[in-house]
Amino acid sequence: MSDSLQVELNFPAGFLWGTATAAHQVEGGNINQWSAWEQKGGGRIFGNQVSGAACDWWNGRAEGDFDRAASLHNNALRLSVEWSRIQPEPDRWDEAALDRYRQMAAALRDRGLEPVVTLYHFTYPLWLEERGGWLCPDAPRLFARFAARVVEALGEYVRLWCTINEPMVYAVQSYLFGLWPPGRQDLGEALQVAAALVRAHAAAYHAIKPDHPEAQLGFAKHQIAFTPRWPVVDGLGAWALNALFNEAIFGAFTRGRLRWLPGMTTSVPEARGTLDWIGLQYYNRYHVRLNPCVAGAMLYEQYVPAGLPKGPDGWGELAPEQVYPLIRQLHRLVGVPIYVTEVGVPDADDSIRPGYLARSLRWVWRACMHNYPVRGFFFWSLVDNFEWAEGYDPRFRFGLYGVDFATQERTERRSARLYRAVCAAHALTADILREHAPEAISAVFEKPPRQMP
Ligand code: GAL
């Protein structure tokens, strides 16, 4: 690629640039079903670690990180509120906690950052756990009550609300694979929990909208790119995984029915028409092949063919261009405005992240140019943080800024400088790449791969 290349990939006016975070991963000191799980030890978390002080946001370090986000020329930031802080008991609201969140939302506005607030990002109070968590038939109503209270308190600062983070990831990790609390391994329960989260979204929508018609309510959906090894032999497996994990719950918002597989549905009529926007979270691609030796209902296994770039064990292929077909897929499924609410890569030494970020943005840009309604991009994450079952495993560092968890010191990474330059220019340009991610120039400006739709 010639040095004089002058290409500029400009993003649409009003596009939101931000990073994404979640309360339990950054705040520190939370007491919820996840912290209880951490206390159990037994290898549930990498090195039996606990989230502890995390990034110490609650005690005042949030604002320093908001300064960092503002220094990146971001105009938005996604964070979540912690249910267990706000409603420590079923009949008690903690006004001081709500005030702290108001303070944080105001601090974001002061810095020109639009807060995008997630109401449920994997953690809930212990009193809900005692009632059975999301399997409690009353959980959607309880969540809606909590959500309405938060919108009441923060509505002055917040327009964009994300009710639920990654319903399918939560259902699968917590109720099918047993890797997250409550550690269950039961497909029926996993489907039940996924449906409960859809109900919770719908209940929150109906509880909030009448009094706050200006509130824009959506949720964040993790989509995985599934590619069959051979279209004929392995196609059925890839199709079924995509149908179950990526597509099933969306039927609720258009037809009032989750459609797991043909003939296998769950009716949720109240969810129809309750999406103002949808969040896409994309991390990796899995190839799918028939393998009758693999235990599991479908006899298909997910793998990464040798030679393809992949993350740490179990992470899957790093294929940033797949964000484009997944944007198309969401548009086909629900047809509402799309925010890319998470894209990121675990990479402690920041050798992969700049190129990964640049390539992701190239495909998000292409979606914008093809008039898909993509309204913003939130990189996961602003700072390194507590990565659920991976804890503080050094292989799972996601931040544009590194964090030394012993001293709370932040270190700006090369990927932060790249993102700053992109957000300032509102464009991904050849000059920016030459300066901050020269290794990505040819991948960003090359012709689309053959198999791209
Ligand atoms: C997402 C999740 C985040 C973060 C990220 C990186 O699935 O929403 O909380 O953990 O993955 O693994």
Image: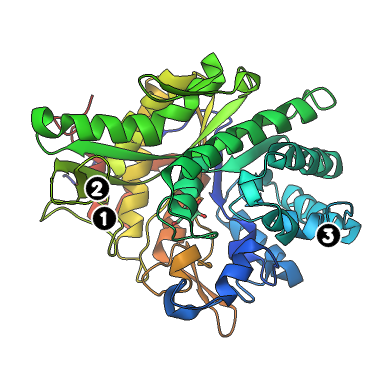
Measured from the top left, where is residue 112 in percent x and y? 70, 46
Q: Circles 1 and 2: CB distance less than 8 Å?
A: yes
Residue at (44%, 62%) from the top-left corner? 398
Q: Which residue is mark 2?
A: 441
- In the picture of the structure, the residue carrying the numbered disc 1 is 438
| Residue 155 figure quarter | top right
Q: CA distance from mark 1 to mark 2?
A: 5 Å
The residue that appears at 13% across and 51% down in the rendered structure is: 293
Q: Nearer the viewer, residue 203 or 260?
A: 260
Left or right of 431 on screen, residue 206: right
Residue 236 on image: x %, y %: 20, 29
The type of residue carrying mark 2 is Ile
Residue 406, compared with residue 305, is above or below; it is below
Which quadrant is home to the C terminus?
A: top left
Pinpoint residue 165: horizontal percent, then vertical percent. Answer: 56, 44
User: Is residue 134 depicted above or below 334 in this figure?
Assistant: below
- N-term-proximal mark, 3 vs 2: 3
**Circle 1 Cα neighbour tier, 10 Å, few/some/many (<14 / 14–19 / ≥20):** some
Amino acid bearing label 3: Ala
Q: Which mark is residue 326?
A: none
Name, please, the residue furthest toward the top. 255
Q: Is residue 127 visible?
A: yes
Q: Is residue 169 left or right of residue 348?
A: right
- Whether residue 321 sits left or right of residue 13 in the image: it is left
Question: Type of residue at label 1?
Answer: Pro
Which is closer to the viewer, label 3 or label 1? 3
Q: Quadrant of residue 330?
A: top left
Apparent side of residue 406 relative to residue 63 in the rendered image (left or right): left
**In this picture, is 450 found above or below 398?**
above
> What element does badge 3 sit on?
helix
Residue at the spot of label 3? 97
